[in-house]
Image: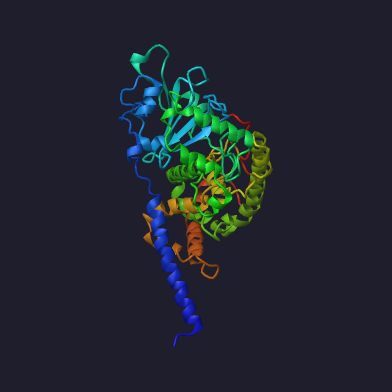
Amino acid sequence: MTSGAGIAGLARRAARLLLAATLALVVARTALARPDEPDAAQPPDGGDAPLLDLGGARTLEAALAQLPAALRSNYVLMFHSRSLQEASPAEPRVLLYSRDATLVVAFNANAAQRGGDALEVMRYDARSARFLFQELRFPAGAESSGPVASPLNPPQCLACHGAVARPIWDTYPAWPGAWGERYRAALPEEQADALRRFMAAREAHPRYRWLLQTGRYVQSLTASRRETYNRAAPEPSTFEFTQRLARLNLHSIAAQLAAAPDYPAFRHALLASVAPRCADPAAAFPDAWSAGVRREYVDWVRQTRSANDAQEAHKQARLQDAAARRDAGVDVESLDALRYLAQRWMGLDTSAWTLAFEKGTYDYAGPSSAALLHAFLLEQAARRDAGLAQLSVANVSDEDRRYCALLQRRSRESLAPLLERGSALQADQLPPQAPGVRVAAPQAHQ
């Protein structure tokens, strides 16, 4: 007869096997293939070629008609925008996105609006782990020549999106200026009326008439609590878009970390920083350094909280709906330990990693950022050490810390020679201030 302890042990082992299978699936899905699904509208290869194949369209309206139906079925509508493209409730800015958000195309109502003569295009290149931006401008009176494509990542895009370009999109659960500003909150009557008027006029509009799945879009914003509870309504596009963009951004961050010169020495510490119950960065350093690291890290976390509090205040002020302002806060995942290692010790600037409107802040709210980053980094590390992936599935309880212990031990072993050889700092001379944590004046746009 099997004892109670034996049954419990079998149950734990079964749970670990299940978790192992789940982890394998997650890791497999994190490997981003190049965007070759039908809705991606693949551009021709080469240098500064257009990011979008418009099939020879010579006007912006004709270009929209050329876009795949799948792309025109997923979109966010912005009734207020700080971007180069103007928006209003009657004439919103549209953000079309592919199923995995590796392609985003933005436009507004007409050439009389600011930015109304151009398509703004963003594409994520999984091979280089880079976000590419381009403007396709349709000059007035030159219909026969078709669009004029800017270079990739031109100055007018990088001025807001940063030298290492990333999308700018507010984080969960509030998106100022979009219909559905607050996740699953009822639209205020003024916004609901504006949306009804827009949808009523849409079919006769030369640009907006190309939007598909409008019923699904409206239902996602107007579903009753019962429909939401029973999952009878689709997720709002603001939430879907956030999840998909965040995943791409985390993939890009992981690739940036892996490309850093000191990544081989820090790879175990980075893994530990985003693994459950392993996040103390001081434990990944040799004993002579751990006390100083721990003191410095406390200040790093404090400054991060201050920056994120300032971001929340800015974001609250940008919300158009007073009810959304009262209820927009959420616990923020700020990846403190990983960012500390990346910036303080690997020399990477993390101040613009977030998708948030306010740069110099550290809000990664959305999908589980730590878990996704761990999966991306584990996939890279497992190429050298397949046993890491197997051991990580054992890290399911406080009683089993083998994975954490292994990562921290290997980190100490790999960092010791690097610190002895390459650093002029002594263990008792760590600077008291965490560098780079700041709140930038809002310059970016949605």
Residue furthest bottom as drawn: 1
Quadrant position of the C terminus in the picture: top right
The number of numbered badges drawn on the structure is 0
Pick the front one: 22 or 434: 22
* Residue 265 in the figure: left or right of residue 362: left
Whether residue 188 sits left or right of residue 236 in the image: it is: right
Residue at position x 68%, y 38% in the image: 322
Task: Give x and y (percent) for residue 401.
Answer: 52, 67
- Residue drawn 42% across the image and 60% down it: 22
Please indicate, yes or no, whether residue 338 appears anywhere in the rendered image.
Answer: yes
| Residue 302, position as x, y percentages in the image | 67, 47
Viewer-proximal residue, 346 or 279? 279
**In the displayed structure, would residue 1 be above or below residue 377?**
below
- In the image, residue 297 sits, relative to residue 47, either above or below, namely below
In this view, which residue lies farthest toward the front? 200
Residue 87 placed where, x, y %?
Answer: 55, 26
Residue 266 appears anywhere in the view:
no
Q: Is 52 positioned to the left or the right of 356 in the image?
A: left
Q: In percent of the image, x 45 and y 48: which residue is there? A: 263
Q: Position of residue 54 (x, y in %)?
A: 34, 26
Q: Quadrant of residue 431?
A: top right
In this orientation, which residue lies closer to the viewer: 107 or 126? 107
